[in-house]
Structure formats: C-alpha cells, structure tokens
Amino acid sequence: MANAPTLVKCLIWDLDNTLWQGTLAEQDKVALSDAVREVIVGLDERGILQSVSSRNDFDSTWSQLEELGVAEYFVVPRIGWMPKSVMVKEIADELSFALGTIAFIDDMPVERADVSYHHPEVRCYEAERAAELLELPEFTPTVITVDGRRRRQMYKAAARRATARSEFAGPDEDFLRTLGIVLRVVRATDEEVARVEELTLRTSQMNATGVHYSGEALRSLLADETHEVLVVTLDDKFGGYGAVGVLLIEKFEHAWNVKLLATSCRVVFSGAGTILLRWLADAAANAGVHLVADFCRTDRNRMAEVAYRFAGFRTEDCDCAAEVPPTFEPGIERLHLAPTQQEPPVTMTVHAPDLRSPEAADLVWGVAGAEP
C-alpha cells in the first residue's frame, strides 16, 4: 500500500457536457445519464464529497440540478462567471481540504489546463472518464465507515452551524450554550475500530504523535484489560459530527500512559479537545494516578502541543514514569501531569465511562446549556 494514491476527498464537477448531456444556456432541457447518476450516488456512499464548478446562471442551474434529483449531493457549489481555477480554490478552502485531495472533471481542455496550471496538485479528468471513476483507486477507500457514508450530511450540518454562528451577536461561549452539545466517550468495539482507524489517518493537526494505528493493531488491544481504546463523538442540535476523537491509554498502577490522542480539527471551535483533556485529568485524579502522554512534534501538530501544555502537561521527572516502558518510536517525548479534579464544562454535557473499572456505570459530567 506504500504506492497507493492519495484518496480524493472531493470531486468537483463541471456541468455542461460533463455531469449532464447538453448546454443549459442553449436548450430547455439537459439529460443525466444513468452511468453518471450511478457515479454520483456511489461516490456519496463512499464518503467522497462532491461539488460543482459551472459558468452559468446560479438560479436556473440549481433548479436544473433539483429537477434531475441530484442537487442534494453537492456541497459548497460555485456557479457563476469566475475562472474555474478560482472556483476550485474557493471550494477547497471552504471545505478546509488540501488541494492534493481535490479532483476536477470537465469536458473542456482549456478549463482543465487552467486548473492544472494554477493548482498542479489537483487531479483533472476528461468528461469521457466520468463513468469509470468508481473503478479508480483514488476514489476507492479501503474501508467505508458509518461516518464516511454520512459525510455529506455532516458537512451540510456544519454549514448550518456556521451560518447560525455568523448571525449570533454574543460571545462564543454563549453561542456554544445554545447548541446543546453532547460529547460521548465510549469504549471502542470491533465495529467501531474502522472509524478509529480512519480518524487517525485523516487527522494530523490534532494527532499528538503523528502515529497512525492500523485496524489490526487496534483490535488486538480491545480485549487487553491494561488498555483503553476510546472513541469520541459529538452531537448538537444541528446534527452529529461523527467520530471526532480517539484515545489509546495503557494503564499502570500509578500512571496512565496516553499513547495516542487525536481529535478532529472540525470541532476545534467547540473546545471539545480541551474538555476531553479536562475529563481525562478528572478521571485520572479520581483514580489516583498520574498521566504520562506520548508526544512527537510534527510539521502540522502544533495545535496538539498547545492543547497539552494548556492542560498543564510538562516535561518533568516523576517516579510514576518508571512504570511506563520506554518507547522506541523516533521523536517521542513524554509529558507528565499530576492531575487534580476539574470543574465540569458549562458548554456541553460529557457522557463517558468510569475508567476505574470496566463494570462501572457510565458517568455524566457537565451540563449543556440547551437541549439538542
């Protein structure tokens, strides 16, 4: 798999003579082939987002997509008179996707050349290849998770959330109270391992070590009573975010070794990463143990280091570290925290297991300001 191509996260469709047959400005009706419809649905089921880049009037174009029954499949569309290269960049920026994860399909060589010249990372395809996209490896994720199949709905919920924030006049904390946020920490099961694996692969800015765990490696730890494999989800009144975090903890008598902490940058605004660390510190304080967190600086995870430092983790010696076996991963340093009990959050409710015992009832920590 070392030479496997980077998976496409978003395919941007041209419309005239690409997605549909015909030119909208020149005829009353255009047609959508069964083959292209199958590709649209198939990519959506694989968790690959789709958008459109078209030089047309917005209202008539969007009405045509609705009439064809496919408008719902497209996010952050760009329909107007800008160069296609500008549209592609705007779509990537709005989705916060690297250009190397974007694909563009158009029947016009000059449009593909424009995009390729300004954004050489973007993969461009001739319209004639539309029917074969589902067969290409860059459009074929190894595992299709529950979150993957719901990715479009999650991004649309995010857009509604962003609109609501832009219309809210008060401070961020007051806005968060209105969302009825519920953060859930659960012990991973075999079915959830694929979601955890996908998250470690997709998350770099908030991955504290940059280490990616395979499904096989994670499954081997599920039955190990010395390890906790925890998956974090987030929901609010606009919908679910899916799996947004993963924690891998090895438990010793006097210390818990946080071997992996990864959270999605999609939930940075909510403070979920900070609250997750506060919950973990509170759980460790209640268990009477210290926390020893593995951390490795990468060129993208400065946010993870800031989160650890803000939570009080420091590079310091402690007798508890003697219990934690040395790591042979290059670049790993150990951050230490002697935890204290934490004040519950005021912007969300946390549902989490009691890490002192697998048999203990789950805990509810914090109070959301509004019902979802």
Image (spheres, helix red, strand yellow):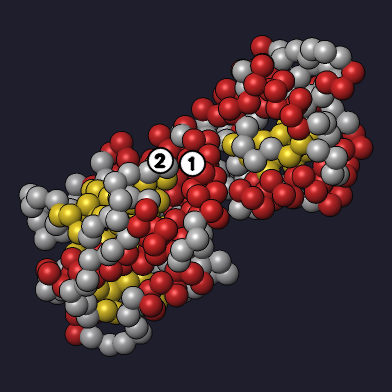
Q: Is residue 177 left or right of residue 360?
A: right
Quarter of the image for the N terminus: give it: top right
Residue at the limit of the structure toward the right, as seen here = 110
Mark 2 residue element: strand
- Name the residue at 88% across, 31% down: 108
Which label sits on residue 347?
A: none
Residue type of the residue flagged with mark 1: Ala
Where in the figure is residue 326, as x and y percent of width and height?
Answer: 31, 74
Q: Is residue 59 above or below residue 159?
A: above
Q: Quadrant of residue 7?
A: top right
The answer to whether residue 332 is visible is: no
Q: Are marks 1 and 2 in contact (CB under 8 Å)?
A: yes
Where in the figure is residue 125, as x and y percent of width and height?
Answer: 78, 33
- Name the residue at 86% across, 14% down: 27
- Foreground: 163 or 334? 163
Using the numbered discs, state the Cα–Cα distance from disc 1 to disc 2 in whole angstroms: 6 Å
Q: Earlier in the sequence, mark 1 or mark 2?
A: 1
Q: Quadrant of residue 73?
A: top right
Which label sits on residue 157?
A: 1
Q: Is residue 119 left or right of residue 133?
A: right
- Name the residue at 65% across, 41% down: 76
Where in the figure is residue 243, as x and y percent of width and height?
Answer: 38, 46
The answer to whether residue 157 is visible is: yes
Residue type of the residue flagged with mark 2: Gly
Which label sits on residue 239?
A: 2
Mark 1 residue element: helix
- Foreground: 253 or 81? 81
Where in the figure is residue 281, as x and y percent of width and height?
Answer: 24, 70
> Are there few (<14), some (14-19), or many (20+) residues within 10 Å of tag 1?
some
Q: Is residue 77 above or below residue 250?
A: above
